[in-house]
Every structure is written in structure tokens, then in C-alpha cells.
Image (cartoon, rainbow, N blue to C red):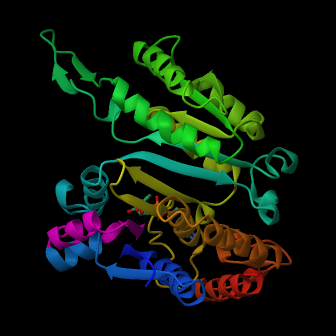
């Protein structure tokens, strides 16, 4: 019997169940055609879990998430739960997962598919062939640093405080992720901070440089975060892997996302401490405006599955097959409504799933 590959599927809210159903078909196909031994578990998260259990992530679902090799998440949230207490909101389920699984590295690829070059807000020649990876630190920095809060000063003025703080182990572990990735890609890391005005940025720069000594085959350069944002929209193809902190990563990954044109195409991975968990999810939300209509784009979720195969299960060939199938289907002119272009064929969520499975069948040898 081949090694068991365990996945917890959390479809979530809105379009989550629709797009996850298509990713599940790809998992089933992999089991049948590539001899892979998947064990699938499924539970609720977000609003769906709140409706069922009174909280956005049940203890059982959390225990399962900790026990499996990978979690596949659809999306959470929606207007139905807007009035729910802050700690029981759908998003709280997501944050609990990130915290409990210690997911400190967020990997966001920005790939421009040839067939969608025209969808980018940049000129085609700037984005054609684009393939960059943003590695964002996810559990430290100014979003979590202490002291924090809003206080009233003796003179009656109010003051808001957040603290940007990083320790050397936090910087080292995220840098190792970036260098490891670059070693399997184009061999270049750009580290981004504000070392010119922030001590935490200076420490980041010094410590990333130390880690680089372990990777002589990878080239490292440093770029101030404001300059990096500018370069991302001026000449994005100069980058391979960008490693950066939580705050700058939040901004830079969204800038990079828009280079590729559509939210429905963007996967992500969040990786935990060695031997720990990992979670794969599309970058987009639950799209309540189109939920239940069968028109959502499942590609971001299917590409997130490809990331799970590559990074958690070390199945690079299978991941590549999925990515090639997506490329092929787009090349055939198949489009869900969000990426529809004149002269192309508009298809539903499930027909897009059919097309990707057919392309995998065709390309598998
Ligand atoms: P959204 O990403 O859900 O939707 C933004 C726009 O993009 C909408 O017009 C939507 O129809 C479209 N869109 C998104 N994904 C699509 C897909 N796969 N196919 C076709 N079109 C797609 O962002 P929003 O509208 O700001 O948020 C909706 C809900 O999702 C909110 O409750 C928000 O809190 C939540 N949210 C969740 C996550 C997550 O689960 N990780 C991320 C972002 C937002």
C-alpha cells in the first residue's frame, strides 16, 4: 500500500463548497490515475460551522486539522454573519487555524497565464511569462507586537500604538523557506524591509544576509519595501522570490496579485513549523454576490491543491500536471465569467472542472 496522504477539506461559506467540489474531483482523479492513497476528511469552518456548532471552528475540526498532513480551505464569511460577536465571526475560524497550526510562512505565487495576459492592468510585455513568489512572514511583526492599543494621554489627546518587533529565530525560519524555494526556482531572493528608517528592518537585513551564507547557489539582494512596490509595477519580471515581513508582505502580495489580472486565479499556501501543518486556500473570499449560481472560478482552489501536492506531499510532477492542465484549458479559450473575454467560451464552475480533468487526462503522458 502506498503512503497515506491525509487532507482535511474545509469548504466554508459562499462559493467555498462549489469551488472545493471541483478540487475534490481533481484529488479523486489523482487517487485513481496516479496511484495515490488519499484519506479525506471534511468538516465545516466559518459561518457554516457557526450555524452548526455555535462557533466558527469546532474542537473536533481543529483536532483534525492538527492531525492531517494538509488542510484545504475554501473561503469564509458573508453578510449573514455580520452581526455575530467578533470572536465568533467566520474569520475567527481562519485565524484560529493559522495560530494553532503555527502557520508562519505565507506563500503567494503571482503567475501570469499566457492566455490571460490581456487581463492584467500592466502592458502585456511586462507581465507575459511572469512567475514570482512572495513569501510573507505571517505570525509576527506589527500585527502582533506589544505594546499595542489606544490610550488617552493626560492632556486628553488619544494615542494609538503598535509595535514592529522581530526576533532572530523568526527571521531565520522565514528566510530559510525563501532560500529553499528559490533553490528550486530561479535561484534569486529579494529581501524587502525598511532598513533605512526601522531598526527591526536593519535586523531583518542583517539576519537574512547571515542565512544566505547557507545557500551559496542562491543570489540575495535587498530592496526597500517602498522601492519594491514601485519595481513590482514597473518591471515585475526582475523578481523570483521576495521575502518580507507581515506588514510589507500584506501590501506587496496584493500588488503582485493584481499583476495577474484576476482574483479567481490566485492560490496560496501557509506553511507551519517543520513537521507541522500546512493550509492551502485561494486568495479570494467567499464571493457572496455570486454564491450558489454555479459560476465561480474554481481555478484558484485547484491551483492551491497543486501547491499542496508540491509543498506538503513532494509530488512536483502531479502539481505540474494540474498547472499545465489549467494552462491548456485557458489556451482552448474556456473561461468562467470573472475572466471572460470576447470570442472565448463562457463555462460554469463544474464545466471548468470537467475541462481541467479532461486536460489532465490528455497531458498525463
Ligand atoms: P471576495 O474575494 O469574496 O470577492 C471580491 C469580488 O471578486 C466579488 O465580486 C466576487 O464575486 C469576485 N470573486 C472572488 N472570487 C471569485 C471566484 N473564485 N470566481 C469568480 N469571482 C470571484 O471579497 P469580498 O467581496 O470583499 O468579501 C466577501 C466575503 O469574503 C467577506 O465576508 C470577507 O470577509 C470574506 N473574505 C474571506 C477570505 C478568506 O476566506 N480567506 C478572504 C477575503 C475575504
Q: Is 221 in front, or is 142? A: 221
Residue drawn at the location 17% of the way across and 72% of the way down:
60
- Farthest front residue? 1
Residue 355 sits in quarter: bottom right
Q: Which residues are magenta?
A: 54-81
24 left or right of 252 in image: left
Q: Is 231 in front, or is 215? A: 215
Above or below for 337 versus 262: below
Residue drawn at the location 82% of the way across and 44% of the way down:
126
Quarter of the picture containing the N terminus is: bottom left
Q: Is 3 in front, or is 237? A: 3
Q: Locate residue 123, reporting x and y percent.
A: 84, 47
Q: Locate residue 195, reporting x and y percent.
A: 51, 15
Residue drawn at the location 18% of the way across and 70% of the way down:
58
- Farthest left residue? 154
125 left or right of 327 in image: right
2 left or right of 170 in image: right
Amino acid at each position: 500500500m502506498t503512503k497515506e496522504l491525509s487532507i482535511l477539506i474545509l469548504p466554508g461559506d459562499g462559493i467555498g463548497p462549489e469551488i472545493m467540489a471541483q478540487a475534490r474531483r481533481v484529488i479523486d482523479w489523482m487517487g485513481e490515475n496516479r496511484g495515490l492513497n488519499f484519506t479525506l476528511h471534511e468538516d465545516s469552518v466559518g459561518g457554516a460551522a457557526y450555524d452548526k456548532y455555535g462557533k466558527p471552528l469546532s474542537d473536533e475540526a481543529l483536532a483534525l486539522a492538527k492531525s492531517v498532513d494538509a488542510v484545504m480551505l475554501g473561503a469564509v464569511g458573508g453578510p449573514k454573519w455580520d452581526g455575530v460577536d467578533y470572536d465568533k465571526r467566520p474569520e475567527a475560524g481562519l485565524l484560529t487555524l493559522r495560530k494553532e497550526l503555527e502557520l508562519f510562512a505565507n506563500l503567494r505565487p503571482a503567475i501570469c497565464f499566457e492566455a490571460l495576459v490581456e487581463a492584467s492592468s500592466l502592458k502585456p510585455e511586462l507581465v507575459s511569462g511572469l512567475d514570482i513568489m512572495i513569501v510573507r512572514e505571517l505570525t509576527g511583526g506589527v500585527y502582533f507586537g506589544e505594546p499595542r492599543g489606544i490610550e488617552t494621554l493626560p492632556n486628553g489627546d488619544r494615542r494609538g500604538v503598535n509595535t514592529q518587533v522581530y526576533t532572530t529565530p523568526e527571521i531565520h525560519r522565514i528566510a530559510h523557506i525563501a532560500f529553499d524555494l528559490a533553490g528550486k526556482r530561479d535561484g534569486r531572493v529579494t529581501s524587502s524591509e525598511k532598513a533605512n528608517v526601522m531598526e527591526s528592518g536593519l535586523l531583518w537585513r542583517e539576519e537574512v544576509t547571515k542565512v544566505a551564507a547557507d545557500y551559496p547557489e542562491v543570489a540575495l539582494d535587498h530592496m526597500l519595501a517602498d522601492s519594491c512596490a514601485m519595481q513590482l509595477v514597473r518591471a515585475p519580471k526582475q523578481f523570483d522570490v521576495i521575502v518580507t515581513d507581515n506588514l510589507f508582505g500584506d501590501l506587496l502580495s496584493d500588488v503582485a496579485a493584481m499583476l495577474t489580472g484576476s482574483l479567481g486565479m490566485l492560490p496560496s499556501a501557509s506553511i507551519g513549523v517543520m513537521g507541522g501543518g500546512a493550509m492551502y486556500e485561494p486568495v479570494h473570499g467567499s464571493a457572496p454576490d455570486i454564491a450558489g449560481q454555479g459560476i465561480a472560478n474554481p481555478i484558484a482552489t485547484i491551483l492551491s491543491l497543486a501547491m499542496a501536492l508540491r509543498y506538503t506531499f513532494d509530488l512536483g510532477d502531479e502539481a505540474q500536471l494540474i498547472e499545465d492542465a489549467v494552462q491548456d484549458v485557458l489556451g482552448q479559450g474556456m473561461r468562467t465569467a470573472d475572466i471572460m473575454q470576447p470570442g472565448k467560451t463562457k463555462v460554469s464552475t463544474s464545466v471548468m472542472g470537467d475541462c481541467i480533468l479532461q486536460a489532465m487526462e490528455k497531458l498525463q503522458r
